[in-house]
Image (tube, rainbow, N blue to C red):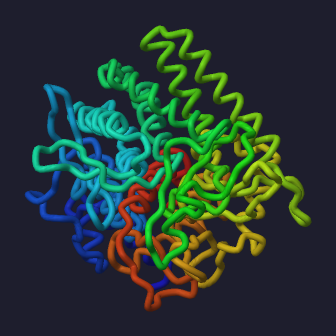
Amino acid sequence: MNRRAFVRGAGLLAASPMFSWRGRAAALGFPEVRPAVGQRHFRSRAVEAAIAAFGQRVPDAELAWLFGNCLPAALDTAVVPGTHLGRPDTYVGTGPAHVMGLRESAAQVWPYLAFVQQDAPLRQLVAGVINRQTRCILLDPYASAFAQNSAGQPAVHERQWALDALCHPIRLAYHYWKITADEQPFDGQWRQAITLTVKTFREQQRKTRPGPYRFQQATADAAGTQPLGGYGYPVRPVGLIASAFRPSGEATRLPFLVPSNFLAVASLRQAALMLNDIHHDGAAYQDLMALADEVAVALRTHALVAHPVHGQVYAYEVDGYGGYALLDDASVPSLLALPYLGALPFNDPAYQRTRRLALSAGNPFFYQGPAGAGIGSPRTGPGSLWPSSLIVRGLTSPDDAEVRQCVQALKAAQAGTGYLPESLPVGGPGPLPRAQSAAASALLGEFLWKLYQERPALLG
């Protein structure tokens, strides 16, 4: 069947009251891959309604099927709703070890912010994630992932300091607050967690000493540990914040990780507004805004470097001594994702130049082939494209043709599973492992819903 006939036929099926979008998908060979209803961890009426609306109105049955699997994936399998001291408390098991990463848990429930106004139980579930993250940060601000002990309480699982891990909970909290006006999660404990977060940021500016954190382990992978006693390579104190690990889980080479510092600036300003408006703490507002301004000035001064082809661009990592690394990694935060994170406007000239570099052969981790054109990661090696970079490329592009290319590449990336893998060979299906990525699937749900709301013609 040619594409025109397929779309016309799919449209007729969608219009038929006797034939639901799921029936249409099944008839076209797309099976049910979600867990059985009784095995799902949480059901949101608003999310299920969004899936139904998307399926009925988007003529591409495969895209509707993919959206219907990816958007609810965290609710189906990852969230564990509960209460602690009478307050919502939600554990989000992420990754192969099913532990709760601060970054990953925020990313997995982020798409549901679009629906919390229509679904009170879903709103409570997200509030529970915020409450659990607060407890985790108070337990250890340098930990990036937490287990759940036999009593259901958080316990440190992995102590790999990543700057962005403390930023994502603030981003989730701020946008939850702006959307719902609910102040209940932002009590004295949350305020203590913000104080501890800011203290950690200042320690890792390393103005007088390396700070209390170090990480070193015996490993055959150089990216799994930090040199020089676990403190990493030296930095010159210029106002930036050091991060021992990248969001991909790989150790930084130069400790000032630029995308994470950009996210820290945005997060500090968001936390400052919350402390001012909720707790009426003008002194804390001034303190956090001053720190954000200090980091922002340091980024402009030390992270912008001259590229022989693209001009002034942002490096991925710097050390304050003039050393820098020109690359971009697929994991968010990335340089490509800065407008998506609210860290830079899309039309910022330096971002535009950096974007062109990131999506070109000038980035050693940019790959192009039959599977698409996007960014990979040192963690998965040469020739391995991350679908999440295709999503971020689409989320940060005003160009319809570019967005359509990303959507088509993402459809192919699921390879019949109904979910996105963390990575795939840029040359097409091959021997690399294609494990499902909860973070990529959640991000795809967000992307497709945003297109459905704002640019539906690109889904046709």
- Lateral position of residue 315 relative to residue 274, left or right: right
Hey, which quadrant is residue 433 in on the image?
A: bottom left
At a point 30% along the width and 55% down the height, the residue shown is: 157
- Lateral position of residue 378 relative to residue 41, left or right: right
At a point 42% along the width and 28% down the height, the residue shown is: 179
* Of the pair 306 and 254, the residue shown nearer to us: 254
At a point 14% along the width and 44% down the height, the residue shown is: 152
Tell me where residue 324 appears, x and y as whole percent.
76, 59
* Of the pair 146 and 119, the residue shown nearer to us: 146
Tell me where residue 160 appears, x and y as whole percent.
44, 55
Tell me where residue 48 appears, x and y as whole percent.
25, 49
Tell me where residue 97 appears, x and y as whole percent.
28, 64
At a point 36% along the width and 75% down the height, the residue shown is: 435
Residue at the far bottom: name it: 431
* Of the pair 122 and 292, the residue shown nearer to us: 292
Q: Is residue 423 above or below residue 237?
A: below
Q: Is residue 53 above or below residue 273?
A: below
Q: Is residue 75 above or below residue 382?
A: above
Q: Is residue 80 visible?
A: yes
Hey, which quadrant is residue 24 in on the image?
A: bottom left
Q: Is residue 8 visible?
A: no
Image quadrant in which the N terminus is located: bottom left
Residue at the far left: name it: 38
